[in-house]
Amino acid sequence: MKKRSASTFFLAFLLVVVLAAAAACGSAWYWMHHTLRLPAERVDFVVDPGSSPRTVARILNGAGVPVWEDGFVWMARLTERDKLIKAGGYQAIQGDTPWRLLERLARGDMTMRQITFVEGWTYKQIRQALRENPDVKQTLGGVDDAEILRRLGSDAASMEGLIFPDTYVFSPGSTDFDLLRRAYQEGQRILARTWAERDPGVPLATPYEALILASIIEKETGDTSDRTRIGGVFANRLREGMPLQTDPTVIYGMGDSYQGRIRRRDLQTDTPWNTYTRPGLPPTPISSPGRAALLAAVRPAHHNFLYFVSRGNGTSEFSATLSDHNRNVSRYILGKDRAP
């Protein structure tokens, strides 16, 4: 009788345990596949490198995605997804369940963003674009350009012109340095390839000189057909030992004092970038040139022009003599002797 009672008690206890385990498994399964209530249609969140499942759960809750922290941890560990979670930017989407979110993290299905550095932008403008992008993690606030150059492995004296202008796709949470490094490496790759395609007679000694000249061409015109001709004017002037006399370099040397107008005294005020007061190329680029400007610097048009002036419509008028140039200035800049 006692044995039967003990046996009955054990079976009853075992049944309770099994039922409790089944209920727990059922509850866990329900939680894993139950739709989360999100505060918006899509919620962005960033997982940092090395984040544990518990850290990820806290990040989700902090972003407004309500997940049970302990449940998320056990779900990740028991399914061995904890070893697969990848750092990057993600979105929780209306209709998601905890299991869907974990699967997305394990597959690395990140949301992507993009940032564009415009041809002709200065390095200052590029840094501002990085600072203003809410998806870029800021890490360079107290880092000077010399340290950035060291981290990039560059021996250039300035960051100007080294960041290639293009559109870069990235995951939210990428750092400002990550993006600078990508754009720098792309610029070095394109510069090396362009330099290898140079005209043997171009009056440039190094790829960096080509970058400097391209940055000037980039600022002088946005017209595709004029770029190589302007490159030819500068090549002719360098061969003749004539100063380049290009206003964008003067403006760059003026820095923040430039207020939209360039005066005679500005042309006469010496700075390292004033190509009216100093012969040859300035010491650094003045902007970030694109592919077309780089090609115009290393493969300029062959002609006898030494001067050009803007027509006011984005194109330029070219001339071989100073007298012709003065007539063009009178017509297009001073507004005299305009054709009817």
Image (spheres, helix red, strand yellow):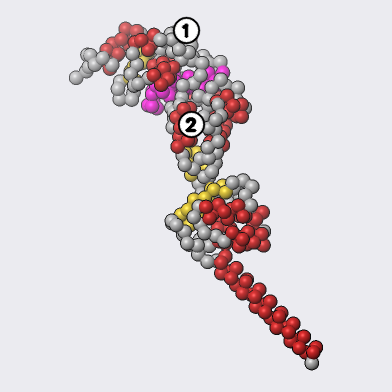
Residue at mark 1 = 241
Quarter of the image with the C terminus in it: top left
Tell whether 161 sits left or right of 71.
Answer: left
Q: State the extent of the magenta-drawn residues as a range.
A: 206-231
Residue 224 in sight here: yes
Residue 228 magenta-highlighted: yes
Q: Secondary structure at mark 2?
A: helix
Tell whether 68 sits left or right of 83.
Answer: left
Q: Main secondary structure of the magenta part?
A: helix
Looking at the image, the residue that sits furthest to the left is: 340
Residue 186 in sight here: no
Tell whether 191 sits left or right of 73.
Answer: left
Looking at the image, the residue that sits furthest to the front is: 2
Q: Secondary structure at mark 1?
A: loop
Instruction: From the top left corner, tell me how far across and down residue 265 is, in percent.
Output: 36, 10
Residue at mark 2 = 127
Instruction: From the top left corner, tell me how far across and down residue 244 is, in percent.
Output: 43, 12
Looking at the image, the residue that sits furthest to the bottom is: 1
Residue at the spot x=78%, y=89% of the render?
4
**Label 2 crowd (10 A; few <14 / some 14-19 / many >=20):** some
- Disc 2 marks a residue whose amino acid type is Arg
- Disc 1 marks a residue whose amino acid type is Gly
Q: CA distance from mark 2 to mark 1?
A: 36 Å
Query: Based on the displayed image, in which of its 4 quarters is residue 122 positioned?
Result: top left
Instruction: From the top left corner, tell me how far across and down residue 188 is, in percent.
Output: 56, 28
Q: Which mark is residue 206?
A: none
**Label 1 crowd (10 A; few <14 / some 14-19 / many >=20):** few
